[in-house]
Image (spheres, helix red, strand yellow):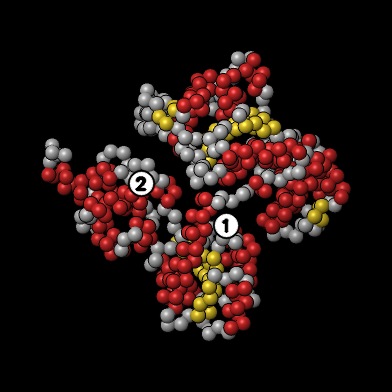
Amino acid sequence: MSDISTNMIENQVATIPDRLKELKGDRTTAAFARFLGVGVSTLHNYENGRTPPIDFLLNVAACTGVSIEWLLTGRGEKESGGSYLQAARKTRRVLIVDDKEYQRDSICNVLEAEGYEIGRAANLKQSTEMLASESFDVVITDLRMPDENDGLILLKHIREKYPNTRTILITVHAATAPVAVEAIRSGAFDYLVMSRTFPDDLRSAVSRAITEIQKEETQSKDTFEDTFGEIIGQCPAIREAVAVLKKGVQSPGTPLLFCAEPGTGREFMAKVLHANDPERASHAFVPVKCGAMSEEVLNRELFGAAEYAGEHGEIPGVIAVADGGTVFLDEVEKIGPAVQVMLLRVLTDGTYTRVGEVQPRKADVRLICSTSANLVKEVAAGRFRQELLTHLSVLKIDVPPLREREGDIELLARRFLNDFAEEIGRDCRDFSPEAIRMLREESWPENIPGLKTTIKRAVLFSESEILGADDIAGSLNSGTNAPSAVGSPSS
């Protein structure tokens, strides 16, 4: 630093507030201060030009994961390895439900000053619609609203549909003991009366709710949620697939290969494995359609490029983005020889090289691949490396097509019926025996997406509570020459 002029140092220090504001992003000063563990007025002073002491800047660097050099001077690598810039800045979201606008505004003002992100709803209908489309940590609802029974209806709805959301009931009247007891028994986190101490009571209640949520989130990193039950099926092949996936949880770095037709749920099962992997679930899951890119483009997208077409700058690559997590490679049989060699390096010594560089980089990703081809024949034909196949198939799962899972078709169809009926507000609740027989006899060339599309179309156009054979037949026939309602078949 001895050769840097005093003016240059002063200019760099003068731009520290700009970098603090960049780190804060769209967060309020109060929220950012709470994350850093400093006072709001202290942070406000530093944002507005007062030179912060080095211990404050070291704390910012530790909390956000940026390098102290970048924070001080604006030069060098911005990130030092922390994850704050991608995911750590989690704003807690609170939904306020009250039919009186002035009360909504009053509550919002109190909580916005604390740095929470606020949603507003005037009645039960608005609140349930917002909960269906957005995620909230806490819901604060008036107990009694015109044209609604009371906030207990919303409370029970939240407990059934969104068990991780905390609900705080409020009232302008002194609550009777029976109402408070019923509220707590129904799952309310707290019950507040709008008295002189209400603002402080509200801050305290929301803070305690968020603390409880944070404790559960911390515990979930150690005792992850078992989501294998989301894989629907009772046939032996699906049970075996779940057993292999659970083996994968016990060996977090081991690659896995799905051998199956498109649309059989390969990517979904890969996501389930990732979600249940305690070492990787908190990192990225990145799917890649290998057949959709040339070898040159795939090489660049997977491993990155030091410089691409000059003006575009560097490309980090999927492997870097998913560091610590999982990369799902669909249609792995279509990967060219150069990319196969690089993948083999990732699997054998955990390194790779970006396009335009010679210095290898480290990689810590789990590779999950899928193919509908016979890779043994691809090896024999010289299109796929035997060594790569050996590494990829340490854990191997053969997923049968839907037409070979006759006993599972009804299970899947009923799940889709319930999901779609709830989604569009229809009272479709079952199939006739003839409809079930027709579903079982269909060949389902598109596999699970084809079944999904058929059920959704039938729910949309049927006027009956019980879907019959005519509903299914009409849905199948209308899909013969029409595009799928849910997009192209998934993996």
In the image, residue 42 above or below residue 391: below
From the viewer's perspective, tell me whether residue 99 is left or right of residue 76.
Answer: right
Looking at the picture, does residue 339 appear above or below residue 483?
Answer: above
Q: Position of residue 303 (x, y in %)?
A: 45, 29
Question: What amino acid is at disc 1?
Answer: Ser
Residue at figure coordinates x 41%, y 53% from the top left: 89
Q: In the figure, residue 267 lies in which quadrant? A: top right
Element at label 1: helix
Q: Residues within 10 Å of mark 2 (few under 14, many from 20)?
A: some
Q: Who comes first in sequence, dot 2 or dot 1?
A: 2
Give the number of the disc on residue 65.
2
Most extreme residue toward the front is: 250
Task: From the top left corner, tell me how far across and down residue 375 is, in percent.
Answer: 64, 22
Quadrant containing the C terminus is top right
The residue lying at 47 percent from left, 35 percent from top is 364
Comparing marks 2 and 1, which lies closer to the viewer? 2
Image height of 252 relative to 52, above or below: above
The residue sitting at 38% across, 45% down in the picture is 82
Q: How many marks?
A: 2
Q: Is residue 249 left or right of residue 357?
A: right
Relative depth, front residue between 134 and 394: 394
Vertical comparison of 226 with 145: above or below: above
| Classed neighbour count for the residue bearing mark 1: other residues with Cα under 10 Å, few (<14), some (14–19), many (≥20) | few
The circle drawn on residue 133 is 1
What residue lies at 54% left-to-right and 70% top-to-bottom?
189
**x and y, in percent, of residue 258 in the image:** 64, 32
Residue 403's image quarter?
A: top right
Q: Which mark is residue 223?
A: none
